[in-house]
Each structure stands twice: as C-alpha cells, then as structure tokens.
Amino acid sequence: MSYETPEVEGYSPIAVFVSAIVGIAVAVLSVWWASGFGPFYETLFRVDPTIEGGGVGTDWVAGNAIPALDFLIALIHAADVLMGVFILVMVFLHWASFRRIAARMRHPGTDEEPETVMADGSGDGGEAE
Amino acid sequence: MTNLDHGKFTRVTTLFHSLLALDVFLLFFTGYAIMFNSELWWMMELMGGATGVTALHRIAGVGLVALIVFWTVLMLISPTGRSNFREILPAKADTEAFIQDVQFMLGRADERHPHARQFAGHEADEVPLLSYVGKGVVYIFAVELLLLTVSGLLIWSKTGLMQYFATRTAAMAFVVFHGLLGVIMLMGVMFHIFEHGMHPAFYPVETKAFIPRSMIPESHDDDEDHEGTGIERLELSPSWHSVSTIFGSLVVIGIVSVLMGSIVRGGYPVPRELVVSGDVTNLLLTVGINIGMFVLFVGLILSMYGNVMRVRWEKEMRRQRNRETVADGGDPNSDD
C-alpha cells in the first residue's frame, strides 16, 4: 500500500478483503438458503406471445394506430440516444479534467510546503502526471 | 484559505435542492422499478409491489408538482429570483467554456474556462453564478420536469386519458413516453452526481450546495497577489484516485445500461420484439441497470452527507460566535 491508514494498522489488507468477501458471501448464501433454494418465479410462467401466432397481447399491436403517438415515441427514443451520448461525453470530459486538476494538487505523503511548489517557477504548480 | 470560497447557494436554495433531490430520487426508484421491472424486480418487491410502488410514485409526484410550483413562484415574486434570471441566459462564453474544456481534456489548454470552473479559488471574482454545465442542467430540468409533470398528470387518470385516445394502447403510450422522457434526466443526474462528487478539490461532495453562502466567511486577502486558482495548495484525498476511478466506471456503466434498457424495453405500447429473459445480454443489462440504481443511491448518501456537513458547520459557527464575537479571519455574518 502506498499510503498509511492508521485505523486498520495491524490488519493486512488481504485479510480485510478476504473477510469482507466471506462476510458478503455468507450473508447472501444464508438468505438464499433461507428462501429454500427456490427457483426465481420471475423466470417461470412467462407467456411468450407472437403476433403471427395470435398469442396473448397481440391485441396491443392493433392499437399502434395513432401516428402522432408513434412519432412522439420515436422522437423521444432519438432524444434519449442523443442526450445519452452527449452526457457520456460530458462524463468523460469531466473525468479527464478532474484527473488533470488532481495532478496539480499536493499529494498525500509529500511533505512539501505549498510555497515550495509555488516557487518552482512554473506558474501552474507541480503537475505530476 | 478555504475550499468553500465558491459558495453560491442561499439557504433556501440548499434546502430546495435537497428536497428536490430526495423527491426526484424517489420518483426514479419507483418509476424505474416499473419500467425496468425485469431488471429491478427486487426494488418493486421492496417497495410494496405494484400497488405500493405506484402509490409512492404518485405521492412523490404530488411533491414534485408542489416543489416546481414553489420554485417558479419564488423566482417570479422575489427580487433575488428575478435578478438571477439574467444569469441563466446562454452566453457566448458558455460555448467557449465547452470548447476550452475539450482542449483542457486533451492537454491543449492549461486552465478550465471561468465559465466551467468548479473550483474558483483565488479567482472567485471571475467565476459566474452558473457554469455552462449549470445552465444546461437548469434548462434540461425545466423542460424535462414540465413534460414529465404534464404526461404524469395525464397518466394519473388512465380512464380519463382514454376518453381522448380511444384505445387502451394509446393510454399506455403515454406511460412509455413518460418513462422514456425520464431516462434523459436519469442519465443526467448520474453525471451530476459524478460532477459534484468526484471533483478532486471537493471530493467526496461539493459543499456549496449544502452550506448556504451566508455561512461561508469570505476572505479578501488582496494584499497578496495570487496567480492562478491556488489549487496546488490543496491536498488531494488519499482515496480520490481509486474511488473516482471506480465511481466513474460505475457512472458510465449505469448511463450506458439505462440507455440500452430504454431502447430494448421502451416500445410502444409493448416492445416491438419481446425480449425473452435469461440470455447473457439480459444478464449484463440487469447488472448494468442495477449499477445505475447504485449510482443514484450513492447520490442520495452524498446528499445526506452534505446535510450532515451543514449541521456540523452550523454548530461550529455557533460555537465560534459564542466564544468570541469577532473571529480572527472574517466575521461570520449571520443573515442575508
């Protein structure tokens, strides 16, 4: 470990990790056991209708006859995709910016005085990465 | 020096923001337990099945209408609200800020544009009330909340809606429309949590949304001529690198999954192709959408944490004021 965490001094990180995994596993398994190892009812009794077969739910398709509503749904689907891609761009933009900003900050463990960094000559401080 | 020198929220804004967040999160949890039921079935079970979830969604919906109307009225009748209106108008600098952000990401600019800066530091005077992202959030929220409220109210009485659109399916189309519309906000809120939770200077949460500006002492040490924001004087939290990497990944997975889910699940009025649950894609989608819900949950926790910080800050301020009437740095001005 690159830095010290005084609270858990005396426990090795591996031991903490293993204990956590065992704890979570036992908790999940016990609940699973308690529920009788039963099947997930979610996956049973599924009606699987097809339009060709005239199965349950085909009448719903017959209702898709209002062009305005159909268009509205298509429009909002497009908006979802466009905005989703844009939001992802914004996430990556900020993620990258945050990493650059973080590189300029003082890193824990380095005992340098802030003034020392300022006096480096470089205006924007010590960029490590 | 303090990293709280960029506080811009008033006390009412902080409270409104927290209440709106709580309400919107509840709407997300209940609404998407319905729309993404194949992935979030456990959430529906947890909140009392279909009856419980729809009831909760409606209660939170009433709350949302109340909050929206409250805020609109407040913005119209208060001088502060009216004077702030100018601040949300788009400016040329916003586009420049976005372009400079892209350049900053690519390493071709040394600083973020003042209209993009979250940490203002010594250059707080240059930073506007709203960054370009902040303006975007205001606009998207305004449009989304209006459309969601209108469609939500129409859905409230499905039989009433069917009077206008003869069929059951047409009424259901409104439900689909409502759900798909919310997806944009859902993705946006995940980004919002990342943006204001993972900034290295404010990690784990940007307190300006929780601690009102009246409670933040402003120091104007003009005798010192500072160059730059002073970010290099702040110490990075030891856990920032790992936590921001993990959380950033979760946010990306969450956004992508919710987007995929909206494409797969959101047909009109039933998906055009019925997806049979159980294959690998479905498993990935299930995991991904649940990760998205986890991101929201983290946001909820951070919001609570921000409020805890405010309470502790208030206590500290009161303690300081009791001990000495005037603190050595700046005097804590009690009210706006």
Image: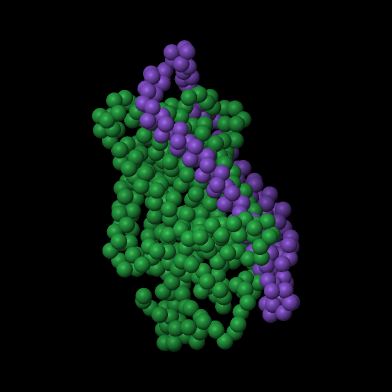
Chain colours: A purple, B green
Q: Decide if residue A104 is on the left or right side of residue B49.
A: right
Residue occupying the point 55% across, 66% down: B114
Give the residue at the far front of this rendering: B92
Q: Position of residue B322 (x, y in %)?
A: 41, 84
Q: Quadrant of the N terminus of chain B?
A: bottom right
Q: Decide if residue B79 is on the left or right side of residue B295.
A: left
Relative to A61, residue B176 above or below: below
Residue occupying the point 38% across, 62% down: B85
Q: Quadrant of residue B107?
A: bottom right
Q: Quadrant of residue B319?
A: bottom left
Relative to B259, residue A117 above or below: below
Residue occupying the point 31% across, 50% down: B65
Give the residue at the far top of this rendering: A53
Q: Quadrant of the C terminus of chain B?
A: bottom left
Relative to A20, residue B87 above or below: below
Residue B284 appears in the picture as rendered: yes
Q: Position of residue A22 (x, y in %)?
A: 64, 46
Residue occupying the point 36% across, 67% down: B83
Q: Decide if residue B277 is on the left or right side of residue B51.
A: right
Q: Position of residue A89 (x, y in %)?
A: 59, 49
Q: Position of residue B120 (x, y in %)?
A: 55, 70
